[in-house]
Every structure is written in C-alpha cells, then in structure tokens.
Amino acid sequence: MTETLDRDVLVRAADRKLIQAFLRHIKAQDVSTGRLAKYTNMLHTASTLIRVP
C-alpha cells in the first residue's frame, strides 16, 4: 500500500510521511488489511482534494 503512495506525485511529501506514520501505527494495533486499505484510500483522496500549502 505504501509503495503506491510513494510513487504518487499528487500527494505532498509531508502528507505522505504523515499517512505512512498513521498506517504504521494502525498496523501495529493489528487492524485488518481491508481496513488499512480503506484508510489508505480515504487519506489519499483527502490529501489530493484538500490542498494545504
């Protein structure tokens, strides 16, 4: 999941680091793979639609 996020040019580097840190945190809590994918998609979509300078 994070490999695709690394290659995406629409997501800023700062946002990418925050998303990856959140995913590592959630994964450490034994959240299911499907839920991780859902969070990844939601955060990716939000970061591309809500552009913060």
Image (spheres, rainbow, N blue to C red):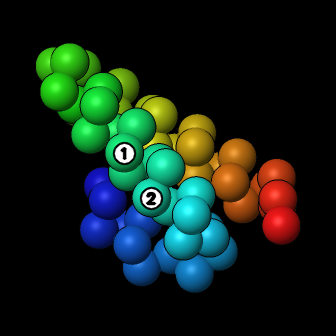
- Image point 22% across, 31% down: which residue? 27
Mark 1 to mark 2: distance in Å? 6 Å
Marks 1,2: beta carbons within 8 A: yes
Query: Viewed as shown, does residue 44 lie left or right of 36?
Result: right
Type of residue at label 1?
A: Ala
Secondary structure at badge 2 equals helix
Question: Can you give x and y, in whole percent of width and height, for residue 32 in the image?
Answer: 22, 22
Secondary structure at badge 1 equals helix
Question: Can you give x and y, in whole percent of width and height, for residue 30 in the image?
Answer: 16, 19
- Image point 57% across, 81% down: which residue? 9
- Image point 17% across, 27% down: which residue? 28
Q: Name the residue under label 1.
A: 21
**Considering depth in this image, is 43 or 38 the residue closer to the camera?**
43
Q: Mark 2 points at which residue?
A: 17
- Place residue 17 in its image quadrant: bottom left
- Place residue 1 in its image quadrant: bottom left
Graded by Cα atoms within 10 Å as few (under 14), some (14 to 19) or many (20 or more), the crowding at tag 2 reads some
Q: Identify whether 45 is placed above or below 23.
A: below
Whether residue 18 can be seen here: yes
